[in-house]
């Protein structure tokens, strides 16, 4: 089974700004956390990424993605009803196929 798609849940109230933070990657380059995650997903051979966001956050996430817009699809989660609901919001993107799920982006 080959997995070609990834879903990132990023609409959680306490997590929605974490992917937009600037970090230093392993090569010493300054990038947003979201861009680093996207680059890792693409390096693993996945082709398409869906990011589940709060309504109105798409523009900020697209800017933080670092030019990977053609590989991204955004889905809004209108109500904070949990991870299962976030994944359900992206069900059309998944198309009934296996996918990689990144449950929020949390750095401690």
Image (tube, helix red, strand yellow):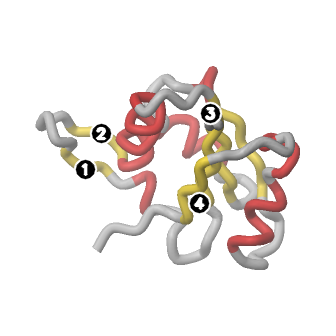
Tell us which disc is closer to us: 4 or 3: 3
Residue drawn at the location 65% of the way across and 37% of the way down: 1
Residue drawn at the location 14% of the way across and 34% of the way down: 27
List x then y, in percent, for residue 72: 64, 32
List x then y, in percent, for residue 73: 71, 36
The reply to whether dot 4 and dot 1 touch (C-beta < 8 Å) is no
The reply to whether dot 2 and dot 1 touch (C-beta < 8 Å) is yes
- Describe the element under mark 2 as helix, strand or loop: strand
Q: Which residue is mark 3?
A: 2
Numbered label attached to residue 10: 4
96 or 1, nearer to the observer? 1
Q: Is residue 61 left or right of residue 108?
A: right
Tell us which disc is closer to us: 2 or 3: 3
3 or 17, nearer to the observer? 3
Q: CA distance from mark 4 to mark 1?
A: 17 Å
Quarter of the rendering containing residue 103: bottom right
Q: Which residue is mark 1?
A: 23
Nearest to N terminus: mark 4 or mark 3: 3
Count every numbered label the image shows and give the total: 4
- Describe the element under mark 4 as helix, strand or loop: loop
Nearest to N terminus: mark 2 or mark 3: 3
* Label 4: how many Cα within 10 Å (few below 14, some 14–19, many 20+): many
Nearest to N terminus: mark 2 or mark 1: 1
Nearest to N terminus: mark 4 or mark 2: 4
Nearest to N terminus: mark 4 or mark 1: 4
Quarter of the rendering containing residue 6: top right
Q: Quadrant of the C terminus?
A: bottom left
The reply to whether dot 2 and dot 3 touch (C-beta < 8 Å) is no
Q: Which residue is mark 2?
A: 31
Nearest to N terminus: mark 1 or mark 3: 3
* Label 1: how many Cα within 10 Å (few below 14, some 14–19, many 20+): some
Residue 16, placed above or below residue 5: below
């Amino acid at each position: 089974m080959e997995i070609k798609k990834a879903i990132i849940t990023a609409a959680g109230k306490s997590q929605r700004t974490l992917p937009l933070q600037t970090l230093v990657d392993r090569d010493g380059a300054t990038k947003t956390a979201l861009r680093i995650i996207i680059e890792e997903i693409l390096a693993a051979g996945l082709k398409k990424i869906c990011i589940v966001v709060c309504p109105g956050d798409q523009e900020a996430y697209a800017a933080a993605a670092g030019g990977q817009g053609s590989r991204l699809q955004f889905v809004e989660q209108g109500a904070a009803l949990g991870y299962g609901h976030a994944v359900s919001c992206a069900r059309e993107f998944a198309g009934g196929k296996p996918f990689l799920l990144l449950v929020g982006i949390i750095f401690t």
